[in-house]
Amino acid sequence: MAGLVLEIAITRIFSAAISYHFTFVAVSVALVGLGSSGLLVHHWLRKIKEGWAANLTIIASLGITLMIPLTLFVMHALASRITYLPLYMLMFASAFFFIGIVISSAFNAFAHVAGRLYAADLIGASLGAVVVVLLLSALGGEGTALMVGLVSSIGATIFSIVAKSRKKILISFVFIAFASSLLFINETMPIFSIQTDPAAQKDLPLFLKENPGSHIVKTQWNSFSRIDVVEGITGNCAGNADPYSQKQCSQTEVVAKIFIDGGAGTNIISWDGNTNSRKELSNWMQYLPFKMKIDPKVLIIGSGGGRDVVAALSSGSTDVTAVEINPIIFETVKSYGDRAGNLYTHQYVRSYVDEGRSFISRSQEKYDIIYIPFVDTWASVSSGSLGVSENFLYTIEGFQEYYDHLESDGKIIAVRWLMDSPRFVSTFSELLERNGIPRTDLSKHLVIVASDSITKDPSVTMVIFSKSPFTDSEIQFLSDAFERSNYKPILIPNVVLVEPYSDFLNGKLSYDEFYAMFKTKAHFVTDDSPFFLSFEKPIPQVLQTLIYISIAIVAVFLLGPYVWLKKNKFEKSEIKTGTAALYFAALGMGFILIELSLLQKLILLLGNPTMTFAILLFTILIASGIGSFASSRIVKHNTRNLTFVISGIIVLGFSYAMLLPTLIYSIISEQFIVKSLISVAILFPVGFLMGMPLPSAMRLVKSYSATKVPGCGQLMAHFQFLVQSCL
């Protein structure tokens, strides 16, 4: 449990302090620490005295308690600067090194009951998957990591009691008191608080630097984000690298700005709650569509700080539905009360904390406008930090949901960057064809306009898709508005059609020829591969780097032990090392492939990524724990029953691949509790079977060669890490 909680806490800390990319660092440091500990136990197995297991586990547990606060303090003292990343990695790896010693020692000492031991490990991890969600919300990333130290000191006490050593029991109680005091100190003094790297190209430090006088007034964590609220914004921006942000800062009277993980931000603007005030917003490019119809019924997906909601109200709408996935942002906006016009409790606003796709799949209403704004800035997009993140809002299936919830003349409005324009064109072209309208008619249904340039980013771009062809009056209204404000139209029906969109929409270019004309990706995305924000061809540079690093790390921890084993003579065994290695490597790869594919599917079903992750890990791990416990009776020492178990996993995998998409779409509109229970029922059978192969094989390996046991588990972990990084 402690290992899983610490790993997830580190992913959140690195994401908020440095960059989303470095969430993978948590996996790397876990691998380095666990791999090193396995080799240590393997090497000294025959050289240590009786009672070695108890001594090692006690020392290692106390080591965890010391290393975690020390690492957090160092990160705080060094302001999380990326320059010192190797130091942070080494220190966190030390904590995992001690965790690995506990695990390896236990499996070596009690390999004859590996099934029960593995079951306990998995059940503990499953509880950790649920507990970490609560801990991150209650204690934050730093407090959650410190809690792991407290749990480890409690573990040391248990081991000391089992060893019947009064001295060790006394020392362990001292460490419990020490770890508890650190949790108290963390709540009262900021000696462990992790700030965002001030030198990082992230929006929070850039904004603070470019807006003299602004300061952070609130920091709050939940299970999937850290929120920083900044006040003291004067509007006197100094050399902002993002021209669009500078325009916002100088014109909108920002009361506060909310940053998510130190990155993309959303504004809370000054408003008195009167729909006749803030009329200037309705003239902004991205809000012009709100004036195309009298009193439109509007759905805003991702309302954030609420500026889009104010713009809709100021443009004449008296029926605005605002959906925001992050409860901290929602409550923060409400906390500003009259200063923000009591926006989310306004008489014309219905507000919900929910994920957009999940919300609209349950909605029975139809809207005049479905508005999908963006909160990411050019800094976050151009860095590639979002390229490896899933986003189901922009898939073709998502747009079909929006299409089905439009009135006959309704509009879908998406605001993003210029580079996304070709992808929107291919997406809406496919959408029309799926609804019986030929691609050649798309130009009648689509308007695209950029704020600054039609040739290069950063240029904010708005795409308006109309369910029915644009009317002459709508075209005239938009054309006149764009000309008055010097906006740059890319596509207006019968007025403007920039190449290569003209040839594509006229049918002169195929989809493949159209895609090939752009330096960035231009194809539409699906729920099976929802990476709309991945624009680099063929794959994001950051992902290539992560893959290379992953392969290098795995190679070191595989080739290193192999060379060492060849150099040192161990007892001969009937089990061939290569055969065992292949089995455990395949086991690790298979486990993580099934887990990640199910995670992606269930995020679409359940909506909330964090709850999905918790439900999946809890169910898979507890089911695997039960399966592991049962393996000693079902599989025993023969491999025939194990073959049946593995065959069952394969059959279930193919069944999920064929049946799961249909099942998800059929129940996606159900209540969350119903979908959660169905998810548990889906996950439990495969989790139960996946808990059997590892302990069964470990018992077999132990009976022939005890010294190979530590390496088996580490090998499985290495390949899980490699596959996870590549996916």
Image (cartoon, helix red, strand yellow):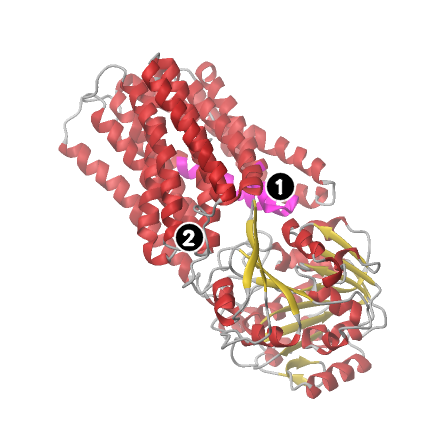
Query: Residue 612 lies in magenta, yes or no?
Result: yes
Q: CA distance from mark 1 to mark 2?
A: 32 Å
Query: At numbered mark 1, what does the secondary structure look like: helix, strand or loop?
Result: helix
**Residue at 77% across / 68% down in the picture?**
312
Disc 2 crowd rating (10 Å Cα; few below 14, some 14-19, many 20+) is many
Q: Is residue 591 visible?
A: no
Disc 1 crowd rating (10 Å Cα; few below 14, some 14-19, many 20+) is some
Question: Where does label 1 land, which residue?
Answer: 660
Q: Which mark is residue 22?
A: 2
Classify residue 5 as left or right of residue 220: left
The image quarter containing residue 376 is bottom right
Vertical side of 632 occupied by 726: above or below:
below
* Label pair 1/2, CB-CB below 8 angstroms: no
Vertical side of 413 occupied by 579: above or below:
above
Q: Earlier in the sequence, mark 1 or mark 2?
A: 2
Residue type, label 1: Leu
The image quarter containing residue 613 is top right
Residue range of the region highlighted in magenta in the rendering: 588-614
**Residue at 30% across / 24% down in the picture?**
56
Q: Is residue 605 visible?
A: yes
Front residue of this view, candidates 220 and 469: 220
The image quarter containing residue 10 is top left
Classify residue 323 as left or right of residue 694: right
Q: Residue 650: where, in percent of width, then height?
A: 50, 33
Residue type, label 2: Phe
Q: Which mark is residue 188?
A: none
Query: Residue 241 lies in magenta, yes or no?
Result: no
Vertical side of 278 occupied by 376: above or below:
above
Query: At numbered mark 2, what does the secondary structure look like: helix, strand or loop?
Result: helix
Q: Residue 485: where, in percent of width, then height?
A: 68, 85
Vertical side of 282 occupied by 267: above or below:
above
Magenta span: chief secondary structure: helix
